[in-house]
Amino acid sequence: MSNKTSRLRVGLIEDDATLAFYLSSMLERNPDFQLQFKASNLADGLLALQQDTPDILLTDLGLPDGHGSTAILAALAHRPDCQVLVISSFDDDENIISAIRAGATGYLLKAEMLLDVSNYIEHLHNGGSPMSPRIARRMLRAFRQLDSQPVVADELVTAPAATAQLSSREQTILQALAIGYTYAEIADQEFISINTVRHHIKNIYSKLYVSSKSQAIYEATRRGLLRS
Amino acid sequence: MRLFLSLIGVFLLILSDAACAASFRVTEAQLSVDQQTWQTVQLGDAWSRAEPARNGLRYYKIALPKQGLALTELYLLIPKVGNRAEVFLNHQKVATIGDMANPDQDFSNKPYLFALPVPDKSQGNFLQISVAGNPSRFSGLSHLYLGDKASLTRLYERQLLATSYLYYFVTLVSLVIGVVSLVFYSLRRNRASFQIAMAGFLWAASVYLWSLDELPCSFTLWLWGMDIIYGVFLWFTCQATLNFLGIKKLRYPRFISICTVLFCLGASYNALMGAPEIKFASDMISVLAWCYALYNIWLQVLKRRTFANLTIAIAGLAMLPIGLYDVYNMWLSREYDAYAAPYYTHLILLIYILALTLALMRHFDRALKVEERYRKKIARSLARKNRELERLYGEREAAIKLEAMREERERIVRDIHDGVGSNLVTLLQNIRAAEQPDPEIEHDALEALSQLRMAIDAIDPVENDPILILSQIRYRMQTRLQKRGIRIIWQVQALPDDTLHVTAAAEVSFILMEAFANIIKHAKAKTVTVSSAYAADQGLCTLRISDDGVGISGQSQGGRGLSNMQLRAEKIGARLDLQSDGKGTTLTLSWLVQQAGPPPQRPANYPLTQA
């Protein structure tokens, strides 16, 4: 783990100078991570992503010259396996769900970092803060909406409902999260490890992203935008 | 209908008239124009137009029978004499009917009853009657009756009923019909009712003129006027029938109009030239018009067999034989006492327009009822629509209010995020970045940040699911609970959707937060057990938070917080139970779920607590 080559390369896009400084110094102190670039606006961030896409991208959403979701799209375009975590002041669902739809696989809360740095590093390792019940509820609803979309057989477009399907385990986990159970409690109840729970959650995030993406393509096709 | 029956009664009375003649009847007389030469004639011959009407003065001489008149009183009944007459008994004038010298008088419409001086039966007594006639109208002398007062009075009354009384009656009823129909017309602007009104008035005028003894104008003018009135009456009656039955053919009104014009021309010619044959012909034209109308009425009635239509058709059909019977008696019969047959035309035409009026009234009655029904239906439907509109308006208002509340909450949450929230984060960073961080200040700042996040959750519950609210509170407090070594036993299960009204969510959020805050601050507990339950049969939702702490009595403070929680529970109609002893505290929040229908509008009423 302490091997230089095995260090996870991290890109940071954050306009708040104090927080950016705080984060970058924290990353530099940690042997598991390597700060690849630090940008204070979207343009710089996009440029850095184009040169070399990191393993993990940490990005704020409200940037002075644009929205952080542009950076998410760019990172995933260059490197589909890039893990994107959104830095947010609060786990206010609207922003986080839209970030997940754009491709984020988790989120980190600024306040949490200030509350407990070691916890924050752990979250960074584990793919973001634990999913709050409110976000779990929003995710459940988002998947239900995707499921209720019409399934149209089309040679060009795969019907989004097929990808929107959560496995029954994922469904159980999401439902348990929505009624307040912790990762550890869920792991106990389901007789799985806590890491498996985290793995499922990462899957759930990416399923919503993939579904949202195919939903967007499906919608675009349906409206004839991609037919050319 | 009652009126109709009484008219039939009058009819029957008149028909029984002939059978009542009891006393001595004179049917033969000596007739002379110059009182020189005399010839024997049958009385009553002049009433039949088979013979030409008598013009000028005629003298009738009748010998009173020697037998059969053993009376102490002697009465003479003349059923019909025209146009004027004088009666002499043995050269002594005993009665005058009209002024012999005045040609504009006609007394032939009524019977006359006179008391005669009782003559000496030993001599041959004779009655002489001078009659002044006019060829334009019936003139001559009918059969006579001689007898006692009682039997002749009875006969006289009967005949009066068939003449004068009948005229008054017909005039009156026709006027009533006219007025009623005119009222109808003023209400409904229906053409048929106007025409019936005109027919009623014209017929009243006609019968009134006919009943006059002393004419207001010359005889010729009077007769002509009556004919013209009859002609116009005929036109109005036929047109009214046409309009009422809805006959659209143009041929029909045209034919009636032509007949009317021809009839009027014939009557005028008769008035100017004195030609009874032309008068007869024009009368026949009017009969033809009636027949044609009747034919069309029946054609139409067979197509639309309603009660009103049938009434008109039957009345019209009944008119025909009776009218023809009148014409026969007046013009064709060779019977000398044909005069004695009552003259029905007045009555039957009245009955016809009466039937028409009744049918029209029924028609309007039905139309009014339909209109009333329709009006009520519209009123009902309007009321329903109004209620619906009010309901929709109310819903919309409520939705707008909720939306406004939601927007306001979002705005506040955003403001807190961007304002106080980010300031607090910056403050915490600065504290951390300081050379020597003050742990107390840092702790206070962290506490403030944590409370702010909870406050945001409370302001913006997003969902009205109490379990989500509870879960979110746990999620927020997890770290702080862990730091104090408090273990949570989470025994929460999902509740059905919409157990809580959206406006109650904030209160529930506050109560639960307060409960956790109390545990952290005062309870000194090791374990907190949180559970939820839903009893579907009672519709009862329960949230329970119990700890193994020191209990409320052991706490240093908290009374105000508890009463505040109680107040909030009451406000949303929920029940808050608190059980506490030295071994711990159990807080139970429960409420009844409204089973059916949307949540009530007033915030005081949502989740119902009534059993």
Image (tube, rainbow, N blue to C red):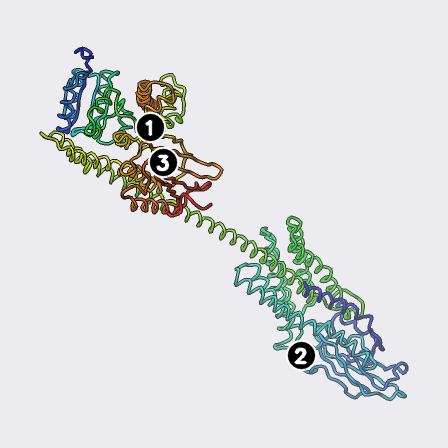
Q: Residue furthest front?
A: B582
**Badges 1 and 2, same chain:** no
Relative depth, front residue between A93 and B335? A93
Structural crowding at the residue carrying mark 1, measured as other residues with C-alpha within 10 Å and reported as few (<14), some (14–19) or many (≥20): many
The residue located at (24%, 37%) in the rendering is: B451
**Badges 2 and 3, same chain:** yes
Residue B376 vertical placement versus A54 (above, below): below
Chain for numbered disc 1? A
Residue A160 seen? no
Q: Secondary structure at mark 2?
A: loop
The residue located at (83%, 82%) in the rendering is: B148
Chain for numbered disc 2? B
State yes or no: discs 1 and 2 in contact (Cβ < 8 Å).
Answer: no
Q: Which image quadrant for residue B606?
A: top left
Specify which label sits upstream in the sequence, 2 or 3: 2
Q: Secondary structure at mark 1?
A: helix
* Kind of residue at disc 1: Ala
**Residue B301: image location, x then y, percent:** 65, 51
Label 2 sits on residue: B103
On screen, residue A93 versus residue B258, left or right, reads left
Q: Which numbered disc, 2 or 3, marks the residue closer to the eye?
A: 3
Q: Secondary structure at mark 3?
A: strand
Instruction: Give the Cα distance between marks 1 and 3.
Output: 26 Å
Structural crowding at the residue carrying mark 2, measured as other residues with C-alpha within 10 Å and reported as few (<14), some (14–19) or many (≥20): some
The residue located at (49%, 53%) in the rendering is: B379
Label 1 sits on residue: A136
Label 3 sits on residue: B546
On screen, residue B383 versus residue B124, left or right, reads left
* Kind of residue at disc 2: Pro
